[in-house]
Amino acid sequence: MVTRHFQLFVIIFCCFFGAGIATAQNGFENIIQINGVTMTADSLRAVPDVTITVKNKNRGVESGFNGVFSLVCYKGDTLQFSSLGFRSKEFIVSKNLEGQYFSLIQLMVQDTFYLPETIIRPLPSKEGFDYAFRYWNIPNDKYEIARKNTDAYLLRVLAYTLPIDGHNAQSRMQQQMANDAVYYGMQKPMNILNPLAWGEFFEAWKRGDFRRQKEYYKNDY
């Protein structure tokens, strides 16, 4: 009786194991790697930065500087090609392809954009142009705003005046603890007798670092 149950268990196990192997082999055979290049349809030039995605799946790649890309997908999937200035394209991977490698040259067609009309009118008079040139408040563009926000002197002043956050406070505390551990059981050196520190102080004085900070505070108030 025990032998019969053991034989039945072995038969069922072999059936499930064989079905799993067949499914894995079938799934591996459906995987294909596509190596290709995106080019213009009229001049056959490489089109960089083309987004290649698998339709209805959250994965894809982007073509390189020379338009070359490589993507792994399943046979029967649909590839979507999109790029700024070109019409979107779709390519259906055939289910009858043999092997796991396929080469593709995708031609991209330039798209035409129609912008709304722009009407340019002159100012009423020369005096009106002179008034607008002197008194109109033209807002800064994004480049000018970014330049002011990344000014080296302004960032240095903000670093000295703004309070530190919790992360910086923790970092400073750990750094201070590490420095104290170096001189544990010893007398710390005094920088008042350090010639290098005095040299840096005189150099900063000559450059006018302290004067510029003082003038900046006066302009704020």
Image: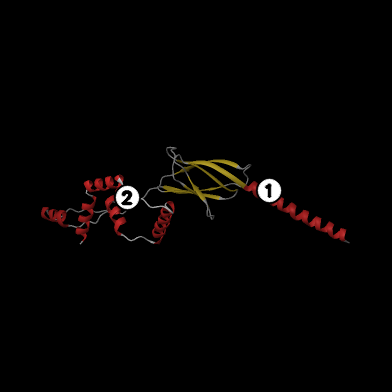
Residue that label 1 marks: 25
Residue 194 badge: none
Q: Is residue 199 visible?
A: yes
Residue that label 2 marks: 191
For the residue pair 207 and 139, the one nearer the viewer reads as 207
In the rendered structure, the answer to whether residue 201 lies left or right of residue 43 reads: left
In the rendered structure, the answer to whether residue 131 lies left or right of residue 196 reads: left
Q: How many marks?
A: 2
Residue furthest to the front: 186
In the rendered structure, the answer to whether residue 166 lies left or right of residue 211 reads: right
Q: Position of residue 203 (x, y in %)?
A: 25, 45
Q: Position of residue 220 (x, y in %)?
A: 21, 60
Q: Dot 2: within a 10 Å radius of its alpha carbon, few (fewer than 14), some, or many (20 or more) residues?
A: few
In the rendered structure, the answer to whether residue 95 lies left or right of residue 110 reads: right
Q: Residue at x 61, y 47 (%)?
A: 31
Q: Are marks 2 and 1 in contact (CB under 8 Å)?
A: no
Q: Quadrant of residue 43?
A: top left
Describe the element under mark 2 as helix, strand or loop: helix
Q: Position of residue 164 (x, y in %)?
A: 35, 60
Under mark 2, the amino acid is: Asn
Q: Residue at x 27, y 45 (%)?
A: 199
Q: Residue at x 29, y 59 (%)?
A: 161
Q: Quadrant of residue 96?
A: top right
Q: Position of residue 143 (x, y in %)?
A: 29, 51
Q: Is residue 117 visible?
A: no
Under mark 1, the amino acid is: Gln
For the residue pair 187 and 73, the one nearer the viewer reads as 187
N-terminal of the two: label 2 or label 1? 1
Q: Dot 1: within a 10 Å radius of its alpha carbon, few (fewer than 14), some, or many (20 or more) residues?
A: few
Q: CA distance from mark 2 to mark 1?
A: 73 Å
Q: Quadrant of the C terminus?
A: bottom left
Describe the element under mark 1 as helix, strand or loop: helix
